[in-house]
Each structure stands twice: as structure tokens, then as C-alpha cells.
Amino acid sequence: MSPDDLIARLDERLKRFETSRQPELILGHEIKAEATALLAATRIERDSLPPTRDDAMRMMLAHHHVSRLYFLRSFVSDPAGDPAELAAAVLMSAWLGNMVPDLLQPEVRALVGLTPATGSESEFATTITGVLQAASMTSGDPAVLDAAVLTMRARLSDPGGDPGGRVASCLCVAYRSRFMQRGDAADLDLAIEQGVRAFEAAEGDEERMSRATNLCACYRDRFDLGGADADLDRAVSSGERALGLVPPGRPVAQVLVNLSTAYFRRFTHRGTEHAALDRCIELVEQAMAAPGGVPAPVLSNAGMAYRERFLLHGRPDDLERAVELTTRANEGGPGAEPDRAMSLANAAVVLRQRFDRLGEVADLRRAIELNRQAIAGMPDHLTNPARANLANMYRELYGRTGEIGDLSRAVDAGEGVLARMPPGHPNRATHSADLSVVYQRRFRRLGSRSDLDRAVELGEQALTGTGSRSPSIPQAAGLAHLERYLLHGVTGDLDRSIELSQRSADETPAGHIERPGRLLDAAIGYFERFRRRGAETDLTRAIAMGEEALGAMADDQPGRAQHLAELSLAHLEKFHLESGDESADRAIGLAAEAEAALAADHPDFTGILGLRCMAHQARYWLRRRRSDLDEAIAAGERALELSGPDDPRLADQVANIAVAYIGRMDHFRRSITPDRLAWLCEQAAGAGSAQPAERLRACWRVGALALAMGRAELAVPLLDQAVDLLPATAPREGDWADQEHRLGSQPDLVSQAVAAHCTAGDPGGALAVAEAGRAGPSYSPTRSDPVRT
């Protein structure tokens, strides 16, 4: 249908309503869609001024008829006048007020306080500022905003048509509103251009105050879009200028809020300006105490500021204040609906933080629910931060429940966010680091090397990206390299891990809630380097950093059990080095604390039981007390009992209990039942989800147990499988020293495999397995290796 036909059709519809007063003629979504189609068909693009006479006439008539439609709809749907419909009517008429004043409806002029005798078009354009904001947030009709922008642009083109910069100020607000609606960076640049012009033309302190705070908001938005430090500094300076123009004793909440938000951006961007965060909170508290209070989105943002201060200093009252404010923001109140999605997203982040602090799974599940609601209610181009948070929440839920579906959802959500972020986006580095951690978790669970390679790739990309300088970025990259070292044994990965983890710890100030975790990550790196190279200084440093990390944590802080376990392992290694009672006792005490700190259904619980099993075995070999051996076996058997068939630690648990059973046989002549041995052999042979080194250890230790019990027919296939796995444990990516170290960590394996074949009366098999073991990493077995295949 042509534009002229659309105009005639709407005109005829309105005339019929004015005669019959039948509401169905003008109400309903299809009528509104018809009006939107008419505005779109007669729209004059921003670069097409001046329009032709015919185009201008069509656009004029379209806006006149649509203005009439909205005005009539407003009083049919609400006798007092529906605000959204009235706003649309005013904005449609604004364009007409500049083009053909005679067509401007008297009712609309009266609505904004103007009369045909006294109201000029310039006054009209200035008066609609507040209505413009309402319409942009309530009508959702792009043509409404375009009409207002076109009106004011036309007004500015008249010589001397903007005394005092009032139209430029309105146009600044309009362009920013359109940017918020569509995300077009050009609109934001135009908003700043008009805002600067308006500020320079202002005629009094109150006008300068209002326009400076508008500029503060525009510069802040442009910083969010492009990440330029200069825009952030301009936002702060504009906001401080506005604050300085506020009359004494009359706080203006919006000025305080805009400046507070600019300081918050400065803190989150630079990370080290703690005074900026305190200034942010000081200002927003003043705003909340001002007459009339603040809208819901401000409460929500204030909660996020308190969350950041909690992260910085670890004070529980800051976290509870954050929960209180973000909860209030979602209870309704002024301005709640337009920004409700963002308020929901912020509440989700704060609840996730409280989960991290207190470990209540209900907080995390509620956070996921709120975050999903937030994504559903946001414009698509604004959903990336919420989607990134959702990925991290699913990752943490997996860490608590062990459900692989949660981990898959975390990967899918994280990759979806990354695909939507262009290179150079200010948030890309942080998100790449977070996604690297998700892939590390999935690698530990499923053992896929492609997951590990992706984790390392993302970590290195995050380090070279622009935007955030958070210590979480080197932390994530360092952990990815550590995982790859533990898999392949290449010392280059280990050294890179220590470099990055130490950097992350150094960049995290004392008292920060994340510092203990970053200290522990660095400690693990030094511990592994001690095991690789034997330098006691590395072990000493690992223990010192681990003890410092533990001392900085609250007794009930989630994650403390994992810290206790890692420190226990370091003291256990120190015991192996020095054979000292103190180290053995410390290792056992820490492992017992870790066990007491976790529920039996926690995914890490079986690993801590396995650690207790090893620690008691170590002290048994020192003191030869049967109670230690009994404790080791009890812990090991419980770990096996709680481990499911897909538990990634199953192979380790099988190996630990087998060693304990061998010790009991050697010293107390007490063996396990044949059925128990057969079950252990089955578990060791079938631990296909574990890494090669873990499967090798399980097959070796259970094979040795079977040989000790005189069951060579069970020992032979397990020990053969362990020898076959030797090449897979040697790092093909590393040099000969790395390969030799890995192979040298199983000194008795081949001799035990030879002995098993000889005991079974198979000298040919003994010779073959001896040759296989001697071949080292270049060996490739002729028989099929189903695991490696």
C-alpha cells in the first residue's frame, strides 16, 4: 500500500471514530502497527534534509494523523489520560509545531502549558524534554523518537533559532535516548556534540548544572561502549562541575547519581583507585537520602558498589547492604519497570557473591533464576554481561553439585557471549579468562585435550586483550598452563603458570576477598616445581604462601576446604623430604579439617578422603602404628564407596586403597577377599575417563596387589596395560628431560610386569613387556590400545 493510501486509510478510520465513538476502531495492537507502518513509509532520513515538498507534506500529514490517534487512544483507554499514549501524541505534534503551527492540536498545546496565543515553537521544543524521556522508555516506537530528533534538528538549522542552547540540550537528551534504544554509537557522538553546545550557551548556574550532568552521563555511556580513558575522565570532571553548581542545601539526586556512577566506572576500570569506590558510595548514599529518594535502578547500582567494596575488604556488612539494596530495587517503586531487567541482573550477581561467601546453594539457584529473567527482559544488544554472568553461575553450580549438564550450559553460554563480542571489546579479556576457567573444569571432568587447549588459548588471548586489568586474567591463564603441565609434564608450561599466578597474587591487595585463592594458585605452582626439580626453596615458598592464604580466610568461607587440602599435600611432600613427625601430623590435621568442612555430597569430598588415606599411610611408614593404617584404609574405602563410575578421581582412589591393602598384607598378613580384588581389578581396567598417568597408577598398584596375593592371572593384564600407557604419559611436546622425568617416576613398573609374566609361566610375555618398557616414549604397541584409540 502506498504512503498516500496509508494516510487516507488512517484519516478515514479517525473520522469514523469521532462520529461513532466505537473504541475498537482505534484500540488494539493492529491499529498501532498500522500507525507505525505509516510513519515508517513517510519517514525522511536524517541525511535527507531539506526534504522535497511532497515528502514533507506526506510526513506532516502522517504525524498529524498519528498524533490524533495517540491522543484519542489515551483517553479511551484511561479517562485521566494514558501517559505513554499522551507522550506519543505530544512528540508527534512537536514536529508539526515547527512545520505547520496551525495543525498543532490545541489540546496538546494545553497539555504542555502552551496556548496558540503565547506558545512559540522554541518554547514547545524545550517543554517536551521530560515527555521525550517518558516516550522513549514507554512507547517503544522508533518513529516517535525519530520525529522528535528531526523536529529539533530542523529548529537548530534556523539562524538564531536556539537562544540559550535549550533546543541543543533537548537534542542531547533525544540522541542519548535513541542510543539507549538502538545502540548506535553515532547517536552518542551527536548527543555529546549537542551537550557541549548546550553547556557553552547556558545562561545560568541551574542550566549549567543540568547540562553538565547530562554530559557526565553521555561521556560515561561512550566509555562503556569504547573503553577510552579520556571519556571516563570527562565524565568525572563534568559530574564534579555539575555538583559544584548545585545550590547549597538543595541536593539534586540525579547529579549525585550520575557522578557516583562515573566514579564506579573509574574504579572498576582501573581497579586500584579505592578512593573512587568510596567516593561513589558516599555520593549515592547522599542521593538516597535526598528528598524524594531515588528510582529502583539507582538502588540496584548502589548495591553493586557495596559488592565491589566487599570484594576489596571482605567486610560482611558491605555484602549484606548490597543484598538489601538490590532486593529493594526489585520490589517496585519509582522507575522500577524500565530498568527492571538490569536490576534483576544485579541482584543475581550479588546473590552469587553471597553464595561464594556462605556456600548456600539456594542463593546460587535464585541468582540463576533472576539472571535468566533479566536476559529475557533486556534488548538483545544489552544482554552480554548477563549472559557472561550466567555462564559463571552454571560453572559454580557444577562445582557444588557435580552435574555435568551445568558445566555444558556454562560452556554454551560462555561461547555464545564471546561470539557476540567484537575484537577489542573492553569486556572481551575478562570474559575470555572466565571461559578459560570453565573449559579447565570440563577438562578435569571429561579429560578432553581439546578442552584444555581451548582453555590455554583463551587465557593467552585474555592476557593480550584490551580493557580490564583485573588480576583474575593472569590467574585464569596461569591455571590453564598448570593444568597442561600436569597432563603433559612440559616444564615451559609450569614456569609460565608460576609467572602468571605470582603476578596475579602480587596485583591483588592484602585484604581483598580473592587474595587467598590467588596466593594458593601460586603456591601450587611452586609445589609442582619442587616435585619436578627438587629445589627445597620452592617447597618452602609453597608452604609459606599456602599458610598465608589460609590465615586470610574466614573459618566458614567456602573454598577453605580446598585450601586446607592443598596445604596438607604440601606438608605431606615435606614429610617425604625430611621424614619429620611435625610435617606428617600437620598434613593429617589439615586433611581432617578439610573433611570436616565439606558435606559428603560435595564433589571434592572424595578427593579429600583420598588425601587422608595417603597422609595416614605416610605416617604409618614412619611410626608403624596400625591405627594409621586402619585410618588410611577406612578413608580410602569410604572414598571408593562415594565415588560414582564417572568420577574423575576414581582411578586415584583405586590406586590409594590398593597401596594401603599391600601395606596391611606386608605387615599384618591380612589380605582382602577374592571378590574385592576382582572388583578393584575391574575398576582399574575400566577407568577410561581418567588421564593416562592416573590410569597407569591405578593399573600398576592394583596389579601389584594381585601379584602379592598370588593372582598372577589378574596382575598380568593390568601391569601390561600400565606399561602400554607409559608412552602416553611422556610429554611429546617437551624435551628429553621432561620425558625422562615422567618415565622415571615409575621405576618398578616394568620389573613387576616381568615378574607377573614369569609367575604366570609366560617367559615370552615377560620378554615382550620388558622390551616395551625399554622402548620408552618412542614405543608404539602392536596390539590395540582402546583407551588411546
Image: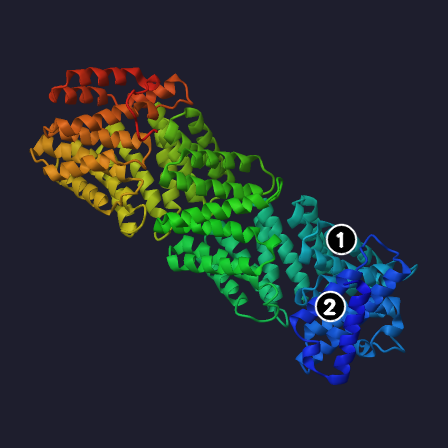
* Front residue of 482 and 60: 60
Q: Earlier in the sequence, mark 1 or mark 2?
A: 2
* Front residue of 173 and 507: 173
Residue furthest front in the image: 1
Residue at the image position 64 percent from the left and 50 percent from the top: 224
Residue at the image position 35 percent from the left and 43 percent from the top: 563
> Looking at the image, how many numbered discs can be counted on the residues?
2
Question: Badge 1, how many Cα within 10 Å: few under 14, some, many 20+?
Answer: many
Question: Badge 2, how many Cα within 10 Å: few under 14, some, many 20+?
Answer: many
What residue does disc 2 label? 35
Q: Position of residue 169 (x, y in %)?
A: 79, 61
Compared to 116, does 480 lie above or below? above
Q: Position of residue 63 (x, y in %)?
A: 80, 68
Q: Position of residue 605 (x, y in %)?
A: 29, 46
* Residue 535 in sight here: no
* Front residue of 784 and 314: 784
Q: Say left or right for 704 vs 93.
A: left
* Residue 737 in sight here: yes
Q: Say left or right for 527 vs 227.
A: left
Given this view, does label 1 or label 2 mark the residue nearer the observer? Answer: 2
Check disc 1 and give the amino acid type: Ile
Check disc 2 and give the amino acid type: Ala
Q: Position of residue 363 (x, y in %)?
A: 42, 59
Colour scheme in the image? rainbow
Q: Secondary structure at mark 2?
A: helix
What residue does disc 1 label? 192
**In terms of image quadrants, where is residue 215?**
bottom right
